[in-house]
Amino acid sequence: MDTAASSNPKDQSRPAAAKGRGQILDALLSGLSRLCALAVLFIIAAILISLFMGAWPAFKKFGPAFLVSAEWNPVTEEFGALVSIYGTLVTTLIAMITGVPVSFGIAIFITELCPLWLKRPVGTAIELLAAIPSIIYGMWGLFVFAPFFADHMEPWIADNLGRLPGMGFLFDGPPLGIGVLTAGIILGIMVIPFMAAVFRDLFEVVPPVLKESAYGIGATTWEVLKKIVLPYTKAGVVGGIMLGMGRALGETMAVTFVIGNADRLEFSLLMPGNTISSSLANQFTEAVGEMYTSSLIALGLILFVITFLVLSAAKFLLIRLTAMEGSRT
Amino acid sequence: MKVKGIITALTTLLTAGCLALALLPAASFSAFAGEVTSISGAGATFPYPAYAKWAAAYHKRTGVKMNYQSIGSGGGIKQIRAATVDFGASDAPLTPDKLDKWGLIQFPMIMGGVVPVVNLKGINPGELRLSGAVLADIYLGNITKWNHDRIKKENPDLDLPSTHITVIHRADGSGTTWIFTNYLSKVSPPWKEKIGTAKAVAWPAGIGGKGNEGVASYVSRVKGGIGYVEYAYALQNRLNHVRLKNRDGSYVEPNSATFQAAAANADWKGTKGFYMVLTDQPGKESWPITGASFILMHRAQKDTAKARAVLSFFDWCYKNGANMADELHYVPMPMEVVTLVEQAWKDQLRDSAGNPVWK
């Protein structure tokens, strides 16, 4: 959408004197790119309409209660989206809490502190990590991470964090190694390479003269990062975080393997839960009956809306950041 | 026959050459229709390995190809109703009402057993004995420790640990779950009342694994776990199976013999539309959680040759496929049942002229 909008005025402002092949090619380019951009709009509209039509029977029957009901019973055909929505949001939040700082660390190390000979290997390793299919992360999570987590970390978490006043209920439960927390951490590991690669590329385009000036007046690495690099790249950083978040929200296979797929509302992070995409992947093939299928499609629509809201929030955040730019010295 | 007739006509009646020429296109058409080269089906995933193996062997013998898409029972029912495939396959039988409503015939093709498996240190496969009621209470979340009195009562000789029981179920909709929950509904009134029978239910406890392999890997991973899988998966993953108390009160091991016993003791003859669920069947040797996978076809067949080709394939499978099914740890249908099925083909399948398709 953005590319089309920015290329159109250019085409129109072209001098009419430029004739011949160039003009035809330009017209062709403009037409084709517009077609591509419009196709995106058309596809989005088509998806939304078909999702809405599919979800309509469920919305009609359950009403707004669909969003807040924790019931998910295929036998009595009583459905509610709360468990899946909660699971989706919580796993994504955990993924961001674990993923964002590590990605920052990686990017900062590579751009600011890394010796030259190590830069390439680390950079390539990150890109390789990004290329691993999600099912591999899921299997690794199930066969390697979950057992380790269950034996060595969850008992400690339950014993120590489980007793914290006020938030102990978040860490209460048997150490299965399978649950919301594990899913969130696996997601965090999965989004790290994406975000780290984006952050690294961003930090690298900060003009050296800015950084050098800061170092020149005696700033520490930390101060350079905080006062020069981050403000310079903030739009991109927010974009990178959104990219990771988008992946975490929609990830299916890896989550299915380790989240435990239980349609019950449990607030403890050590207990099994479910996410929207995982519910869809598991239940769609054998969902019989209109209400069941429709409720699953409604879940899909909700995921669509959540993603849209997240993107909007990011845009809003950017606008506010830009508006505040002048006031800060 | 027709081609041969034409040849004689050509050789003897040279004068009637034009007549023979006029007949030729019709003759070649019927010969083409008689030679069906491929049949198609869609549905249940559980019997897919057996169907695929049978199809490969049948193709080698006869040249007829069977294309089977394992898209799930729900999909299979949808596809056969829309008549986009020659047959549908479902793990759970359709009720006679639905069969009548949609004009379908159903028959059992192959059997399998669902086996509860546990992860308990120091207890060997087949040592733990459970009754249906206790199993249901474990899955209801009423029994949460392995050394619970009711489990101890059935296993006085075993040294049961105090480990927490982790219930493991299927996360995806599945025929296996249908059979399992059908059994629990039969043996436990609370289960029937609160949960019921379906391919996916509102599990009151535990964690869900995707597919048989998902449940199998959770059970082998989680200490104190209990799950249910198809027999083949229990064998392949060397899982620790449980002995179950059947309707006649004896504790039986899951194997081909006990599955066959459940099928043989079932009253197929008195059941309309083969609506037979093999759970909790009578008989001293019967494994209580046995289930058959079904084939669905339209009663009114437009393309007789195609329908006959489909039935010939199934007939061949019934008669020659037993060993192949055994190798994959499925259980072939007992011969008495096959006879009933083929009788049903004769009685119910009709071509467009109203004649029986299978003779």
Image (cartoon, coloured by chain):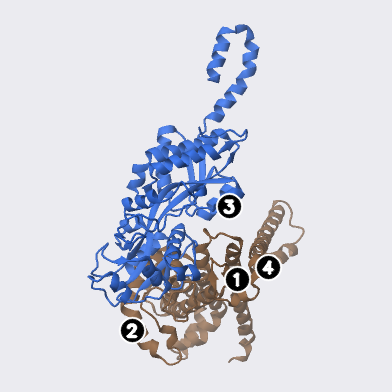
Q: Image point 29% across, 76% down: which residue?
A: B147
Residue position marked by numbered label 4 in the rendering: A6
Image label count: 4
Residue where numbered disc 1 is placed: A302
Q: Quadrant of residue B221?
A: bottom left
Q: Which of pointers 1 and 2 lies earlier in the amino acid sequence? A: 2
Query: Could you confirm whether marks 4 and 1 are on the same chain?
Result: yes
Q: Secondary structure at mark 1?
A: helix
Q: Residue type at mark 1: give it.
A: Ile
Give the answer, above or below, for where B289 lies relative to A240. Answer: above
Asked which quadrant contains residue B58, the reply is top left
User: How far apart are the two marked residues, 4 and 1, measured between alpha carbons?
Assistant: 31 Å
Disc 2 packing (10 Å; few <14; some 14–19; many ≥20): some
Q: Are marks 1 and 2 in contact (CB under 8 Å)?
A: no
Residue at image mark 2: A156
Q: Are marks 4 and 2 on the same chain?
A: yes
Question: Which chain contains the residue that carries disc 3?
Answer: B
Marks 1 and 2, Cα distance to the nearest angstrom? Answer: 36 Å
**Disc 4 residue type?**
Ser
> Which chain is displayed in brown in the rendered image?
A
Closer-to-camera residue (A244/B299): B299
Q: Mark 3 or mark 4, which is nearer to you?
A: 3
Chain coloured blue in the rendered structure? B
Q: Are marks 1 and 3 on the same chain?
A: no
Mark 3 neighbour class, 10 Å CA radius: few under 14, some 14 to 19, many 20 or more: few
Between marks 1 and 3, how big is the CA–CA gap? 34 Å
The chain carrying label 2 is: A
Q: Position of residue B227 (x, y in %)?
A: 37, 66
Circle 3: residue type: Lys
Q: Which residue is mark 3?
A: B98
